[in-house]
Image: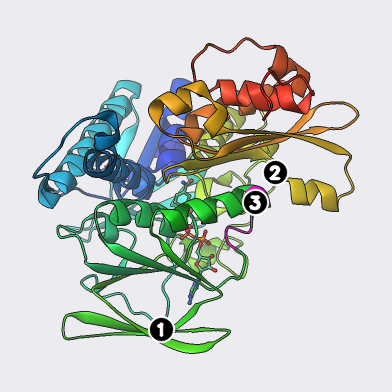
Amino acid sequence: MLKKQTHYDVIVIGAGPAGFASAVRCAQLGLKTACIDNKRDKNNLGRLGGSHLNTGGVASMTLLDSAKLYYQITHEAATHGIRAENISIDMPKVIGRKDKIIEDISLKMVGLFAHHKVDHIIAKARLLSDRQVEITTEDTHLKSSLSATHIVLASGSKPIKLSCATIDNEFIIDSKTALNLEVVPKKLAIIGAGVVGLELASIWNRLGAETVLLEAQENFLSLLDQQISGEAYRIYQSQGFDLRLGARVTSAKKGNKKVTLEYQDQDGTHTLRIDKLIVACGRKPNTADLAAPEANLLLDDNGYVYVDENCRTNLPGVYAVGDLTLLGPMLAHKGIEEGVFVAEFIAGLNNPINYDNMPSVIYTEPEIAWVGQNEQALRAAGEPIKVGIFPLNSTVRALAMDKTEGMVKIIAHAETDKILGVHIIATQASELIAEAVLAMEFSASSEDLARTIHARPTLSESVHDAAMILKDRALSNK
Ligand code: NAD
């Protein structure tokens, strides 16, 4: 039930990772807090977690785990001497498992709101002027308003649409529908070989779909360390991804239960006929109807909310966190940190975020993870650097697991030895990167990593060994 004209210390708009974290932290700090989100589940109950949980990162990673298991049984078990015959896949059950995990996580989040006495309001919120928020309940369309001393905008982002490939969610689908297919497409194309495109390709390719990725840019994963992106390109190709770079999709039309797609590259125009087309070409902030015009919330030309270094918008007492701003990359953990930071800032604390040590992960297999600067950027800036690289195929644990593809690359300042960047492509790189983030947070040198004892046999030895190589102290000849 909505309480009309209730005043809160803090109203958070959006219950994705950033908004949820902010609301819980505000409540922990003794602030009377409401969090407004209009997402509902199939039983019409409020659904927390935003796109990251429900249709993005968590959903995708959960399906990838199923796909990896299927692939292991069908393609990798034999090398262990394990015979697996007549293996089949029940896609509705795979999707059902993913949905159940998401539901359980959301229920835990509901429990945390109740525990911390955050008012969860299931409605659409719109920022008005003078720290007022209009709320509209979707079933009754009733409007009312709430006021707050502080307002945190955390409405997240959504996939960008392409005018040349209109989503019908049957044949031409977005990344959300791509996580709910109950039949594995025989031939699949994905527009965009960015993070989302690669993660979806990793799922459907493993489940048996012939997968073509069409990427407009000539350079593959251009933001990554070039050595890592080069290795990733080679590995993905060897896994059967058909990666076509410099390929700009110009049209996609459905007909006869197929999609006919045209793209252009340096050789001219090409046509593909596929069963499904996924559009994964970026995300944009959810700001279209976030604020009434009279609120005068300042956005940039691309719809991002303008914020200063403390996540403050142009309006007094109004903050924006997560995917809404350009303060850092579109990452769930960045949003969580900002949500917590803003809650503490409101409560009079100031614990700034170190954006320089923000880890990034691409959840494929092997995974790619990195923190800090890459080699080409450091060389372009004229920094004197030393590089240590350790290949996974020399790591005992990786050999035992038969997961020998990839490398760990550590870059340190040539004079001070301070670690400037760590780049990993390896199975479980998302876990391995945590050590590098911690080391950099403590301003560690590569010597510190090299002298830190790592358990044997573990994958983390590859981080240690890359540091040993950087210090010219390698025990192996790699
Ligand atoms: P992206 O920008 O990383 O990749 C989209 C790609 O599509 C680009 O490389 C672009 O060149 C290409 N493209 C656009 N139009 C095209 C066309 N007509 N033909 C061919 N190619 C075209 O976007 P994304 O992968 O959708 O990810 C969106 C955001 O969400 C990113 O900021 C990403 O970091 C974030 N995200 C992160 C994770 C994670 O942390 N693991 C997971 C999902 C999303």
Residue range of the region highlighted in magenta in the rendering: 220-227
Our reading of the magenta stretch's main secondary structure is loop
Q: Viewer-proximal residue, 331 or 20?
A: 331
Residue 327: x percent and y percent?
64, 49
- On screen, residue 349 above or below 321: above
Q: Amino acid at mark 2?
A: Glu
Left or right: 163 in relation to 141: right
| Residue at figure coordinates x 61%, y 62% from the top left | 298
Dots 3, 2 in contact, CB < 8 A: yes
**How far is the residue under mark 1 from the one under mark 3?**
33 Å
Whether the residue under disc 2 has CB within 8 Å of ligand 1: no
Res. 164 mark: 1
Q: Amino acid at mark 1?
A: Cys
Closest to the camera, between mark 2 and mark 1, is 1
Q: Residues within 10 Å of mark 3 (few under 14, many from 20)?
A: many
Does the magenta-highlighted stretch encompass residue 224?
Answer: yes
| Residue at figure coordinates x 32%, y 34% from the top left | 119
